Amino acid sequence: MAYRQHHGSLTAIEGSPFSGGSGTMTSEGITVSPNGKFMYVPVEGGILGFAVDVSTGALTSISGSPFSVISGSQLFIDPSGQFVYSPVGAGITAMSIDGSTGALSILPGPPFQAVASLTAPGALAIIKAQ
């Protein structure tokens, strides 16, 4: 279910719950782009992508979703909103985000090797360069 907070209470957003297709979804992996326009959810066999109506909160499936990529149960978006990363065992899957549609494209080379297993929640940190 999706809710809107209004004066301390929650109200269901019209159209909620939103269908995401098949696959098991976990709330720990849901992530929203820094501009609030896109939401991504890891599921078995890929990543669901939604466009977020910033005025109503309604979700619309992004064309091409679910995106068939190797992903873990968590997703991380870099501060610029251009890339999404998913720790997978001892590797990291990296994807670019189309800024106008929200579609994901896998970056050449992944999964990138990590120095240790990245299975614990919050096992990846993205630091913005100054």
Image (cartoon, grey):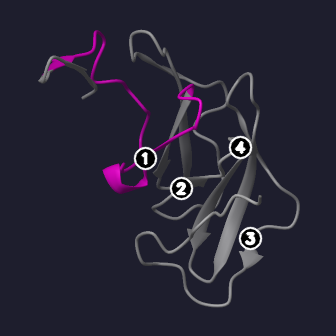
Q: Report the residue at 59% width, 30% height from top.
A: 35
| Residue 88 pos. (x, y %) | 58, 72
Per the model, the C-alpha gap separating discs 1 and 3 is: 20 Å
Look at the numbered disc 1 and give the secondary structure of its residue. loop
Q: Which residue is mark 1?
A: 30
| Residue 75 pos. (x, y %) | 53, 56
Magenta residue check for 18? yes
Q: Nearer the viewer, mark 4 or mark 3?
A: 4
Q: Report the residue at 36% width, 48% height from top.
A: 25
- Circles 1 and 2: CB atoms closer than 8 Å: yes
Of the image marks 1 and 2, the number of the one nearer the N terminus: 1
Magenta segment = 10-37
Of the image marks 4 and 2, the number of the one nearer the N terminus: 2
Q: Report the residue at 71% width, 23% height from top.
A: 101
Which of the numbered marks, if any, corresponds to residue 80? 4
Indicate the amino acid at tag 4: Ser
Q: As drawn, is 114 to the left or to the right of 124?
A: right
Q: Report the residue at 53% width, 29% height from top.
A: 36
Q: Which residue is mark 3?
A: 111
Q: Quadrant of the C terminus?
A: bottom right
Q: Nearer the viewer, residue 122 or 39?
A: 122
